[in-house]
Amino acid sequence: MSTASQGRSLGYEANGINVISEGERKGRPRDLFWPWFAANISVLGLAYGAYVLGFGISFWQACAAGFIGIVVSFLLVGFIAVAGKRGSAPTLVLSRAAFGVQGNKLPSLVSWVLNVGWEIVLTVLATLATATVFHRLGWSSGDVTKVIAFLVITVLIVGSAALGFDTIMRLQTIITVVTGVLTVVYFILVVPKIHWSTVSSLHSGSAQAFLGAIVLVATGFGLGWVNTGADYSRYLPRRSSGAGVVGWTTFGSSIAPVFLLGFGLLLAGSSASLSSAINTDPIGALATILPTWYLVPFVIVAVLGLVGGAVLDIYSSGLTLLAAGLRVPRWSAALIDGVLMIVGTIYVVFFSSSFIGPFEGFLITLGVPISAWCGVMLADILLRRRPYSEADLFTSSGRYGVVRWVPVGLMVAGSVLGFGLVVNTYASWLSWQGYLLGPFGLGGKTGTWEYANLGVIVALVVAFAGWLICGRAAVRRQETSEAD
């Protein structure tokens, strides 16, 4: 466990997974707007227009699915952020209160893999976007450009995450302002590419397709962040408004994706060729519809938006690695994750022939267990009436115990049910999923519920309801026991 330091050099954060001391807690709930806005203003949100319309639904159905998926999923992040304000520790440390100090290693591992996966996704997109723009400008092309872009982006992401919280908060404020302005200019420039007659003629899809689109959006946005919600609220004073924490987290993270997805739907719905190109190189395809003079500003907004998300991911994944039991300084954990990010990005950029397949497969697969964990965590936060016992979060002999089998069992059971109710054809090693669609009378793996992704919702609801019912007595015993 890392310890706190009273001083910082050049923005370096000495805190690790320890509880933030009273003297270091600072800020107001509205400060949460900046990191969450910057992390989610990525122009990848535009690309989701093509992904959502891929379910065969109409423009208005897609708008509704996008709004519901984005706002509801980020509302969950806001609720979990409340735990950070209450406990002043990272998300996956506070999760120990529900799962036990050692039992919590299961969700920590899932969370860590999810974060590393997102780091890779965002770094890949930033690298491909830069290479595409440079090629269009005639400045350079080929693998050399990709390598240079990759190296610059990697240094920015890993360096910021290694320096820590204060550096990240300053960086995210800058990213928010710059990307916000440049994104609005992008909207203005590509408006002529929108053909409302084509968009409005898209046929409505089934209820199953509509639900599937909601779940895809939820897993791609808020459910990809629930395991980090408390990491950025843990520095707030404990007297801060819980409603303010929920509100500013949800608003900051949702506002940009709602507009980006809506505009992306208009673009993708207007051009089948653009929609298809987005599946291979999402952001590079969006650059092809721009005038040449705006390509450099576009690559700035694209890269900064993606870096904003990747920095939060790698920072949180480092904290999660420490919460899982790795005994190294926080910056070392960030560097370890940086190495894995580099290896994964190299594979996707230089060896993978398709982007959207592995991307969707990754989201849906990890969306199931993280939803189950989220259900337990939300119920646990709702049940608690007293502050966390700080010392007991770091010892198996304390009130939170070694392994709390009911929450662990609920996460496993929710995942087993969830995997059985999603179909994943994006890679051969995922074909085993969907095994309950037939027995449950839902038409099997090729029936009408094939791509509804019910498993993500089922995993969350089962785990939430299970711990809300079974955990009340256990939480009360924790809160009334004497600290060791």
Image: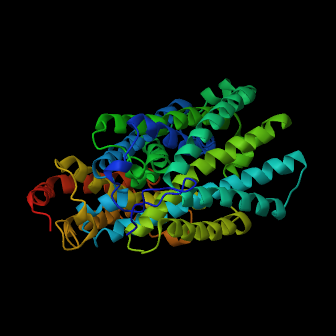
Residue name at image x 55 percent, y 50 percent: 167
Left or right of 397, for residue 246: right
Residue 348: horizontal and vertical position, in percent? 67, 65
Residue 61: horizontal and vertical position, in percent? 49, 33
Residue name at image x 21 percent, y 70 percent: 405
Residue 49: horizontal and vertical position, in percent? 60, 40
The number of callouts visible is 0
Furthest-front residue in this view: 7
Q: Which of 434 and 368 is in front in this view?
A: 368
Relative vertical location of residue 159 with respect to residue 204 in this rendering, above or below: below
Where, quadrant-wise, is the N terminus in this rendering?
Answer: bottom left
Q: Nearer the viewer, residue 18 or 393?
A: 18
Left or right of 150, for residue 34: left
The answer to whether residue 263 is visible is yes
The answer to whether residue 357 is visible is no
Q: Which colour scheme is used?
A: rainbow
Residue 292: horizontal and vertical position, in percent? 85, 37
Residue name at image x 67 percent, y 53 percent: 125
Where, quadrant-wise, is the C terminus in this rendering?
Answer: bottom left
Left or right of 310, for residue 69: left
